[in-house]
Image: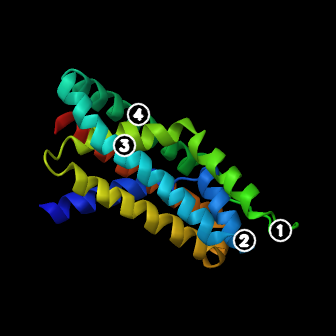
Amino acid sequence: MSISVFLTGLAMGLTLILAIGAQNAFVLRQGLRGEHVFAVCLTCALSDAALIILGVSGFSKIAAILPWIEPVMRYAGAGFLLWYGARSLRAALSSGAALHVSGEGATVPLASTLLACLAITWLNPHVYLDTVVLLGTISTGFPGQEAIFGAGAVFGSFLFFFALGYGATRLRPVFAKPSAWRVLDGTIAVVMWAIAAKLVFG
């Protein structure tokens, strides 16, 4: 059961950060340029880890004090996932965009790069919805094993960001094609809806 919970956390963590976004585009760009890749990947992964731990450890305590908040957040989380899935499906069906990253220009200092990385990460409201609220809510479905679920989600963040940063050169020709993003967005839509159903029906 513990392995299953860990893998669920891993899958959920990966699913929530797979979609194209400012943070992922920034990491991919740094990987393609070969600039401060380790520092950027570590910053993103540690930021995610801090927020996931906050959601997994703090949400259960809040739910114990305010028992009504768990079902409210569970249904709100399901609603968010349904919307997120619908947005991903729409992108899969209609989007012709690909992720273009320029490798031209002068090297940016490490301090400036990390400042931009932190701003993109911590000033994005979706980061809090995905980690603190959504993962925190889902973790309550595994009483006594919230930490294992959180560990899986944290591992997923480290795995994704370092794979994206250091695998950027190999990924570039694949994700330069709009069809690759359509397949990815379609998969995300299905996973999101499946998790929403689990939140609602148990």
- Mark 1 or mark 3: which comes first in sequence? 3
Numbered circle sitting on residue 35: 2
- Mark 3 or mark 2: which comes first in sequence? 2
- For label 2, the SS is loop
Q: Where is mark 4, residue-wise?
A: 80
Distance from Cα at disc 1 to Cα at disc 3: 35 Å
User: What amino acid is at disc 1?
Assistant: Thr
User: What amino acid is at disc 3?
Assistant: Leu
120 relative position to 59: left or right: right
Query: Which quadrant does the C terminus fall into?
Result: top left
Foreground pick, 26 / 15: 26
Q: Where is mark 3, residue-wise?
A: 54
Distance from Cα at disc 1 to Cα at disc 4: 39 Å
Q: Report the residue at 48% width, 57% height from top.
A: 46
Q: Where is mark 1, residue-wise?
A: 107
Distance from Cα at disc 4 to Cα at disc 3: 20 Å
> Viewer-nearest of labels 1 and 4?
1
Q: Are marks 2 and 1 in contact (CB under 8 Å)?
A: yes
